[in-house]
Image: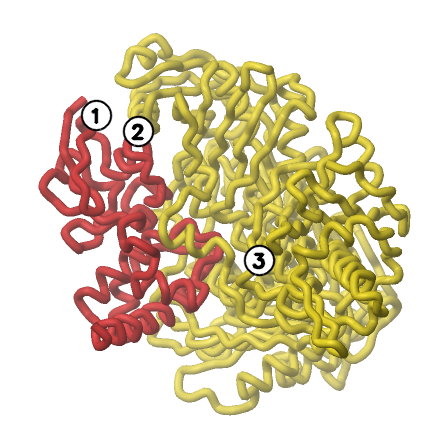
Chain colours: A red, B yellow
Amino acid sequence: MTRINLNINGASQELDVPEDMPLLWALRDILNLVGTKYACGIGECGACTVLMNGLPVRSCQVKATAMEGKEITTIEGLSADGKHPVQRAWNDEDVPQCGYCQAGQVLSAVALLNRTPHPEDADIDSAMSGVLCRCGTYVRIRKAIKRAAGYAAEDGSAS
Amino acid sequence: MSAPKDPVRVDRRTFLQVTLLASGALAVGVARPQLLSAAESEEPWVANLYVRIAPDSAITIVSKNPEAGQGVKTAFPMVVAECLEVDWKDVSVEQAPLDDRYGRQVVGGSRGTPDGWDDLRVAGTAAMYLLTAAAARQWKVAPDECTARDGHILHPATGRSLPYGELIETAASLPVPEISALKLKSRPADFKLLGSFVPGIDNHEILTGQPLFGSDVRLPGMLYAVFEKCPAFGGRVRSANLEYVRGLSGVTHAFVVEGTDELEGLMPGVAIVAETWWQAQSARRQLLVKWEPTQSDSSRAYAQQAEALREEDGNTRRSDGDPDGALESASQVVEASYHYPFVAHANMEPQTCTALLHESGKLELWAPSQNPKAGRALVSRVLGIAEDRIHVNLPRIGGGFGRRLINDFMVEAAWIAREAGRPVQLQWTREDDMRHDFYRPGAWHHFRAGLDTAGKMVAFDHHFITFGRNGKPVSGAGLSPGHYPAGLVPNFRLRQSLIETHVPTGPWRSPGHSAYCWAYQSFFDEVAHAAGRDALEFRLDLLSRSYGEPPLDLERTSGTLRTAAEKAGWGRDPGKNRGLGLAFHFDHGGFCSHAAQVVAEGSHIRVEKVWSALDVGPILNLSGARNQVEGAVIDALSTAQLEISFAEGAAQQGNFNRYGLLKIGQAPDVECHFIQSDHSPSGLGEPPFAPVAPAIANAIFAATGTRIRELPFARAGIQV
């Protein structure tokens, strides 16, 4: 066991983890942040995506011990009230079906919009291609990302 | 709490139940008498069905079925809210646990909607009836002078109005109405809320990462388990290095589960329990098990058997007219063979279940199961715990598709938790999930169609080679002898042969239909093409007459076909390297046709758009309904690229790197049209799926001239 200090959703967290434990399991089983989901364990499906310094990473593929000094954002910490433009757009387009992959979809979309505020379909396909959805919500994900871009622009002009 | 009122028996099935709860709330629901008596013998009746109206007018609607993404947790309460004349934002929804008083609690067969439709409307309308009667009594006016809006009963003539909460005490004291006296809304024209676009009731929790799913359950003192089974289905444990594994970091227990030989029950294996799931899984990597395999099935051997069986006659399941004579005298005979492989469910949430054996001896489970009642019976039988001592909570399911109609994961979790003496969450790996699925079985279809001089299909001979065990088709391998084109051609024969299999199979989204529709509808295209006829005209003609009982509603089927074709602009030139394809189907009460447009870019095919037309009666939630259609299109296109194969008795694919679900860039646009007939509503989880793959395959033929007769598409050299 190794004692580490992680910055998760803006708060400093001290925890003991097995040296080789991926960030995913530190979040789920030690910190009880269960919004980040396990689905493949090999970095193929993107369900476990979190943001590390604003960039999407597969939390099943990075060790928790390697995350010291990084800012980690999970779905629980994306906004205080669930009103991030991407969260609002995801609800308004009613993207989720079973919902299990959606934390990974939402955080991947947030990272995309941070770099490309007004993405074209090709940008969306490329940024989102690593996050699988068996229910087939892709049609709505495309729409929701464009809607979120609009919300973010409105929020920006309002503030 | 007051005693329940004498239930009014309306038929042999249903009671209306009206109760004033200790909290002062009015509860209205329906129940089944035979289940009621069983439940009542155990504990006092707590009416908790469908709708509760609190003294502060807060409305709670109970959702009885498990939610797996099919949208029932939103659509069902919408039905009650519609009948109750309340604003959707004033309603909260509560997930029911497994409770016999709710009747059927299953996600499957697209039956939730048709099964729930009457009960939900009765509950909502009865509550409305009682509240109206209560207000009328208070105001000393006739009930039919009163109306309801936004949670209030109004008396327009005098401008009086009372919120529901102030009427519940009086309402509870009134005689329970006859169900036959209730005026149930049934037609789309009557609806205000139903048919509108309502986002999912759990969206906020999903989008903020709140605990909701089976794998999100966290209990004090809970441990995490993995369970290793023999890669070759059915194999037993001979020995394992348990002592060594027990000494590994975080491990609290490691033991052999002898299990049974029931594929759908508790299979033999080794359980490892640890403080965290990662530690259990890490220890598992050092687990060495000597297995005793019991079979060595392989896809290669299946294919050899299928080839040999092809020459045989098979078992004739239906014969109409004179198929041999008609084929003999036909002016043209079209012959083709189709084959599709086994596929896995690949729910995004690998199987999981959490179990806690209370000190009292009661067992509590958190089971993302599509059929929790069957799971409870299985657990009861294997663990020897009476069913009434097992409580099953129903967390949200991370994808169903039929996989969780089988409850092996429930009995494993229950067994491991009892052995460990601690609450345990069992979490399968992706590999466990893909290698221990209940697969959709593969099959071979050998078709011969005879055409007359006018190009009409007058004879159809079909040799269906599928999988069986002990001489019977396995689960998911069924095909009704009444399935079209039986009844649509005068001379028809269905012959069936079985290949013995030891591979677990089970229901897979639209069981059977999701596979063989592709074969039928692709072959119809071949026949139309050989006859020199338009694919739409050929199908409409096929659906224009029947011989004996029609196998499906010809009008409604043709209606969807016409709509899909019209919306797609059937008959237009789609452009260079582009093609349009069509297919229709009927299953699980729903009628569906799709038209697809593809563009060929070398051997690569891009599916540009799918136009879908469905007749499932009135639409309850427009968003949920469209979601099922859009999802089915993508899921079906995905599945047409996938295959599970077997060698030495085991599945050869274990994760998404070898079983690659469709990605967003491959997903077509979907345009969805509902023909909202006045027929009572049917479900939508399954009907849109089956005709997708053939519509796309037919479009690929139109664009490229390549006829896909084998799945996955890659076998025909087609990359999507």
The numbered disc on residue A18 is 1
Disc 2: which residue: B278
Disc 1 vs disc 2: Cβ atoms closer than 8 Å? yes
Q: Position of residue B488 (x, y in %)?
A: 79, 71
* Numbered circles on residues, count: 3
* Element type where label 2 sits in the image: helix
How far across and down, in percent of the image, does residue B557 sit? Answer: 71, 74
In this picture, residue B638 sits left or right of residue B4: left
In the image, B681 versus B402, the foreground residue is: B681
The residue under label 3 is B91
Is B17 left or right of B258, judged from the image as shown?
right
- Element on which disc 3 rests: strand
Name the element at disc 1.
loop
Amino acid type for the residue under numbered disc 2? Trp
In space, the residues marked 3 and 1 are separated at their CA atoms by 45 Å
Task: Residue A133: give x, y in percent of width and height.
Answer: 41, 55
Q: Amino acid at mark 1?
A: Pro
**Residue positioned 53% across, 70% down in the render:** B197
